[in-house]
């Protein structure tokens, strides 16, 4: 089948295909459905070539994998796994000086002198070219560097005083053969510039059983020339990559002896041997040892003459490197031991953890010389950051300021929204909770959708009244956010940088440090504790223990092991009406009243009854209880929805009610405990002696506000507001000032949020025959809350579900009373 040398071929695998120029195969047995990746596709001028399919592992590869635990590749085979887009030399490439001219080559001849002519001449089958007015010139067999001289000499027999230029144009195609253990043995038509490597790429290279080191070029009447691909791969040597001629045969014989090289070597693989090869030669083929290899010895596995496998250790530091390898040997290099020789490790809360060289008589003081060596880099980084200059304060823009004011209106701490004129409106309803805006009073909800929403969220209204009212007792703290939350806030709402005083990073455990020591006899770890404070601060020789090789010294911090309370560093914040408000370091055994006395006491304006005491441990306990309740409530709501769906005639659940319930649960999950502890102050408390002598913990915050002169009335009243305090007025007087309860008020469940955080309800004031709640004494800073009525369900089948929810909300009210 005659085809041009520039034709392109296609494979049929459909894998990783790419356009590439190919070569012509003259074996018609390779049809469209053959496995030859260079098979023809209806004479198409374009073709696709897939990545050559991988060959199965050889028996020796499987043997090496069983021995070394890794699959070793056949060295050099990956060169042919994915052929390049073209492996043939470009047609425009200039021929080399040793190129031999032959029939079919195009010669570009330019002549000027007595006459001028420019011709493209093709060498005919007899090896001649015809030059006008000169005649035929025989050029076949000449080297390219000899061609111009020969043509000039022939023309000089006719002309004198002339000049000539001779170049090669389009070169001929030649046919060569690839036989033996090639992936695709065949006859190939290639460019006359092609070399052995070009055609090897075309044939897919040797098979897994073919040789990479003894590829023969057989040419008529000449001894075979040997190509070792290892020279090309390892040294870039192409001197044996000969140019091909018409009729050349590339023969790939079966591979010779092979050995495996694995372990800590740069090129682990299976290598083919050529001639006598030593262990040293093999290591050079593998690129030498890698960084962590043991360069003193290697492991050698060999199949002896009795066909049994034996393992030996070859000392390559001496004469072992001259060991002659045999077919089937497996050489494995070793990893250096990870053990440190004569060293001591120190780690933990210190400036420079690491390893140090051990020497006889070495003691703890040699690696822990002083106190400064125990300050960590994190400590200094945090300390140095405090001195970094900050940008100058800039007021908030009008846009950001208006946004901040809007957010403050939506989250007002007293439970009601504030308009732009500073007036107050009714409490937020469930619809407002969902939308995030004050959309109106409960009376304005008249649509059927809002009615269903009110029924589904009736219990939430009572919960919110409790929540909003409870938050009003956090006088001076901006609502429900605890001062504990602000410990990590470095930027104020106005954008100014706040100066925080906190415990430095890495509080050291002075009473305990430990040496981890390996018993050389039992190989068990033994812990040898010592007192770090006595060693470093007191220079106690009894604690300056002698170190042994491979000891590990660990310096612990108070974050690693909980230490006694007396040893803990504690910072407590005193805020508000103190003579010297600030952050104080608590002395051992110091209580709250002792600390207040050390701070100079309280001012004349201090209102102890309205004080707030916050503790981190209390907040964690409260948050845990709150999360447990919300989890139970969510499960109860899901069960109630399932009951309503099962008892419904349609078997469906009101989607609006489900949305409202999910909104309620999401709002509850966003609640965070404040950690406030109610202190037993009386309304008339004004002396330091009334402050309880409770032990202090790190992070405690004691806030004492000035004495207020207002009382708040919140909830379902006609004019909820804040009124001036009058010692002669009782609860009923303030409610009357607010316009009395409105038509949706549940006056029977009104309650008082005291300034000290406690809750006083109508139920608590009930006696045998009368109820004194309306005549309750009101103190400055108290808040009177009149909740809204529960919206009763219409259907009888929902009574049981809502009674369960009411019970759960009762539990939450008690939790909120503790939290707030």
Image (cartoon, rainbow, N blue to C red):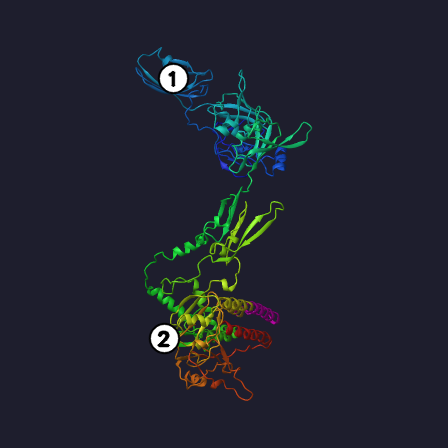
Residue drawn 58% across the image and 24% down it: 276
Point out residue 458 in the picture as x, y percentages from the top left corner. Answer: 52, 75
Q: Is 668 situated above or below 339?
A: below
Q: Which stretch is magenta? A: 629-656
Mark 2 highlights which residue?
422
Foreground pick, 305 / 28: 305
In percent of width and height, residue 469 lies at 46, 75
Q: Nearer the viewer, mark 1 or mark 2?
A: 2
Label 1 and label 2: CA atoms lie apart by 106 Å
Magenta span contains residue 270: no
| 72 relative to 478, above or below | above
Give 587 or 802, whichever is nearer the viewer: 587
Viewer-proximal residue, 209 or 771? 771
Q: Secondary structure at mark 2?
A: loop
Disc 1 crowd rating (10 Å Cα; few below 14, some 14-19, many 20+) is some
| Element class at badge 1 | helix
**Main secondary-structure element of the magenta-colored stretch:** helix
Q: Is residue 141 visible?
A: yes
Q: Is residue 344 above or below residue 250?
A: below
Q: Residue furthest front?
A: 541
The x and y percentages for residue 428 are: 45, 74
Is residue 455 among the parts visible in the rendering? no
Residue 43's tag is none
> Which residue is disc 1 drawn over?
148
């Amino acid at each position: 089948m005659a085809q041009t040398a520039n034709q392109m071929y296609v494979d049929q695998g459909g894998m990783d295909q790419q356009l590439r120029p190919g070569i012509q195969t003259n074996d018609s047995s390779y049809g469209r459905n053959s496995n030859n990746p260079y098979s023809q596709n209806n004479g198409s001028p374009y073709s696709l070539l897939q990545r050559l399919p991988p060959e199965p592992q050889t028996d020796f590869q499987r043997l090496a994998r069983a021995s070394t635990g890794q699959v070793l590749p056949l060295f050099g085979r990956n060169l042919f796994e994915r052929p390049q887009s073209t492996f043939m030399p470009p047609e425009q490439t200039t021929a080399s000086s040793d190129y031999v001219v032959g029939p079919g080559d195009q010669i570009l001849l330019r002549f000027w002198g007595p006459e001028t002519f420019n011709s493209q001449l093709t060498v005919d089958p007899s090896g001649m070219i015809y030059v006008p007015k000169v005649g035929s010139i025989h050029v076949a067999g000449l080297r390219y560097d000899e061609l111009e001289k020969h043509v000039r000499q022939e023309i000089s027999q006719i002309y004198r005083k002339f000049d000539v230029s001779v170049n090669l144009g389009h070169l001929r195609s030649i046919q060569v053969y690839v036989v033996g253990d090639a992936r695709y043995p065949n006859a190939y038509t290639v460019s006359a510039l092609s070399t052995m490597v070009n055609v090897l790429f075309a044939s897919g290279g040797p098979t897994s059983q073919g040789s990479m080191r003894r590829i023969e070029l057989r040419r008529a009447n000449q001894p075979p020339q040997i190509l070792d691909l290892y020279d090309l791969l390892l040294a870039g040597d192409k001197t044996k990559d000969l140019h091909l001629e018409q009729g050349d045969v590339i023969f790939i014989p079966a591979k010779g002896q092979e050995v495996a090289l694995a372990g800590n070597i740069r090129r682990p693989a299976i290598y083919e041997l050529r001639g006598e090869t030593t262990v040293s030669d093999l290591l050079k083929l593998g690129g030498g040892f890698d960084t962590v290899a043991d360069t003193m010895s290697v492991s050698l596995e060999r199949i002896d003459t009795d066909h049994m496998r034996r393992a030996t250790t070859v000392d390559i530091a001496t004469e072992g490197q001259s060991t002659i390898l045999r077919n089937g040997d497996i050489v494995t290099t070793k990893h250096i031991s990870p053990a440190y020789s004569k060293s001591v490790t120190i780690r933990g809360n210190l400036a420079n953890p690491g390893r140090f060289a051990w020497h006889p008589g070495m003691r703890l003081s040699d690696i822990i010389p002083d106190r400064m060596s125990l300050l960590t880099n994190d400590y200094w980084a945090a300390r140095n950051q405090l001195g970094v200059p900050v940008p100058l304060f800039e007021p908030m823009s009008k846009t950001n300021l208006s946004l901040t004011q809007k957010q403050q209106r939506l989250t007002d701490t007293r439970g009601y929204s504030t308009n732009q004129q500073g007036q107050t409106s009714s409490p937020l309803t469930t619809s407002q909770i969902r939308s995030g805006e004050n959309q109106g009073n409960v009376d304005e909800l008249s649509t059927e959708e809002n009615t269903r929403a009110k029924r589904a969220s009736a219990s939430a209204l009572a919960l919110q009244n409790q929540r909003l009212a409870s938050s009003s007792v956090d006088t001076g703290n901006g609502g429900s956010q605890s001062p504990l939350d602000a410990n990590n806030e470095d930027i104020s709402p106005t954008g100014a940088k706040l100066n925080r005083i906190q415990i430095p990073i890495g509080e050291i455990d002075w009473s305990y440090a430990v040496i981890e020591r390996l018993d050389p006899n039992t190989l068990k770890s033994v812990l040898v504790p010592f007192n770090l404070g006595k060693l470093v601060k007191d220079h106690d020789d009894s604690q300056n223990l002698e170190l042994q090789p491979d000891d590990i010294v660990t310096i612990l911090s108070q974050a690693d092991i909980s230490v006694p309370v007396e040893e803990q560093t504690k910072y407590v914040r005193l805020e508000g009406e103190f003579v010297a408000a600030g952050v104080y370091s608590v002395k051992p055994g110091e209580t709250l009243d002792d600390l207040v006395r050390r701070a100079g006491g309280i001012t004349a304006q201090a209102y102890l009854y309205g004080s707030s005491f916050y503790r981190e441990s209390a907040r964690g306990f409260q948050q845990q209880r709150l999360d447990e309740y919300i989890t139970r409530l969510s499960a109860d709501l899901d069960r109630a929805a399932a009951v309503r769906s099962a008892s419904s005639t349609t078997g469906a659940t009101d989607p609006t009610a489900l949305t409202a319930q999910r909104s309620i649960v999401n709002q509850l999950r966003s609640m965070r405990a404040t950690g406030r502890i109610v202190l037993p102050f009386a309304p008339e408390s004004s002396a330091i002696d009334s402050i309880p002598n409770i032990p202090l913990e790190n992070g405690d915050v004691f806030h004492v506000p000035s004495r207020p002169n207002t009382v708040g009335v919140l909830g379902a009243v006609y004019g909820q507001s804040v009124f001036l305090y009058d010692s002669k007025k009782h609860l009923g007087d303030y409610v009357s000032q607010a316009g009395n309860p409105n038509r949706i008020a549940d006056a029977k469940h009104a309650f008082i949020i005291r300034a000290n955080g406690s809750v006083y309800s109508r139920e608590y004031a009930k006696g045998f025959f009368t109820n004194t709640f309306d005549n309750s004494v009101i103190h400055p800073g108290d808040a009177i809350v009149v909740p809204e009525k529960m919206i009763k369900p219409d259907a009888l089948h929902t009574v049981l579900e809502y009674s369960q929810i009411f019970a759960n909300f009762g539990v939450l009210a008690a939790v909120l009373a503790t939290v707030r």
